[in-house]
Amino acid sequence: MTSGPPGPVRAVNARLAVSDLSVRFRLPDATVHAVTDASFEVGSGQCVALVGESGCGKSVMAGALLGLLPGNAEVTGTAVLADPAGDTDLLAASETVLARQIRGRRVGLVPQSPAAHLTPVHTVRRHLVDVLGAVGPERAGRAARHAEAERVAAAVGLPVTALDHYPHELSGGMAQRTVTALALAGRPWLILADEPTTGLDAPLVRRTLDELRRLTDAGHAVLLVTHDLDAAARIADTVLVMYAGRIVETGPVDRVLHEPRHPYTRGLLAALPRNGFHPLPGLPPQLSALPPGCAFAARCPQVGDDCVRRPDLWPRDGHPVACHRPC
Ligand SMILES: Nc1ncnc2c1ncn2[C@@H]1O[C@H](COP(=O)(O)OP(=O)(O)OP(=O)(O)O)[C@@H](O)[C@H]1O
Ligand code: NI
């Protein structure tokens, strides 16, 4: 989305630095450790993929960055967004700042469940025009907004006929493309894309991923949350592998996916159909009852006595892994 009129935040040298991000959900009888001590950076021209099994904390991490978690969430750490609009710690920002300056403008979210984010009584066109009215170029008139709505829709492969449909008339794939178009409408610098290819057939998966990569190459930044390691391989520069709320391995995409060091990452790769479909045995631990040592130990083929101590993510640069016995 680099052609056409400039949006509120241009693609520029910018950076999001997340440091020691933790999220706890306080329940009456338990505490859910959804995300623990996550640190990573993403800058202009970079796509970072966050991968891991269902329930490991990926969406909670994305929600924390935009202040979208429910009231029982306790968020600690910092997430400093530094761009020409200023330096803002997303975790410390007020709801007013998040609503007026961040969401949709500096940071866009492609949500995991499109249906929950669409208004049943509004057409796709109305959704897009409303969002463009809220976050689009300030002086854009009605005709310009309508033209821009059609351009944004086309960019994500929404046919023009879909614009006059109501949410209940959309297939899963159309609804997915609608929320993607809504997230991109305000040309946010950072795009948090939470499973943006769910429900899409193979050509649309490629189209959506390629659009995210195109935006990345134009100077935006993308955090791609996905189960799909092939999607990560296609467009990401860096991979974060998450297990039970912690980042357990990270590094350049080629290194992590071709020379995985954590037994968990190896297990994820071995579970792919093209690698013989060897599913990981067992289940992840409950996030309300994490063991004191390595959370993967109970499922790990390389477990040893030292794994009762929790391993740190090490070394700091390059290709760190949180494992006492890396591959
Ligand atoms: N409001 C909440 N209260 C308590 N626990 C919650 C709440 N929201 C999420 N959780 C828990 O936090 C954990 C992480 O959930 P999250 O949605 O981030 O997983 P995910 O990695 O995105 O999974 P998926 O791949 O299935 O989308 C889960 O165990 C979930 O049950
Ligand atoms: Ni999720």
Image (cartoon, helix red, strand yellow):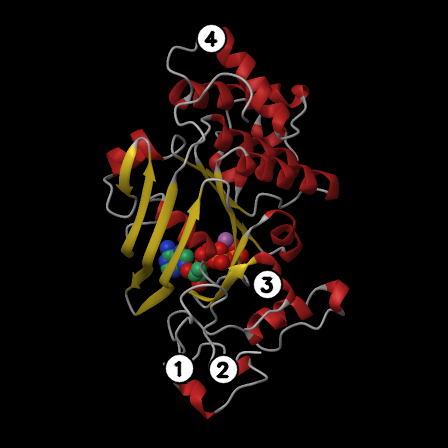
Q: In the rendered image of this protein, does residue 16 appear above or below residue 76?
A: above
Closer to the N terminus: mark 4 or mark 1?
4
Q: Position of residue 167 (x, y in %)?
A: 57, 30
Q: Is residue 16 visible?
A: yes
Q: Is residue 166 left or right of residue 23?
A: right
- Residue 34: x percent and y percent? 39, 62
Q: Real-space Cα distance between discs 3 and 1?
A: 26 Å
Q: Is 19 left or right of 123, judged from the image as shown?
A: left
Residue linked to disc 4: 142
Picture layout, residue 141 above or below residue 181: above
SS for callout 4: helix
- Of labels 4 and 2, earlier in sequence is 4
Q: Nearer the viewer, residue 216 or 69?
A: 216
Mark pair 1, 2: CA separation: 8 Å
At label 3, which amino acid type do we have?
Arg
User: Which kind of residue does numbered mark 4 sit on?
Assistant: Arg
Question: Which one is earlier in the sequence, the residue at label 4 or at label 3?
Answer: 4
Residue at numbered disc 2: 297
Q: Separation of disc 4 and disc 1 at Cα?
A: 58 Å
Give me the residue at 26% from left, 34% from top. Answer: 97
If you read the primary sequence from the N terminus, does the residue marked by circle 3 or circle 2 appear first? Answer: 3
Distance Cα–Cα, label 4 vs label 3: 49 Å
Which of these two is toward me, 303 or 213?
213
Quadrant of image for the C terminus: bottom right
Against 171, is 38 above or below? below
The numbered mark at residue 293 is: 1
Q: Secondary structure at mark 3?
A: helix
Q: Are marks 4 and 2 in contact (CB under 8 Å)?
A: no
> Which dot marks residue 88?
none
Q: CA distance from mark 4 to mark 2?
A: 58 Å
Crowding at dot 3, Cα within 10 Å, few <14 / some 14-19 / many 20+, comes out as some
Which residue is the site of mark 3?
255
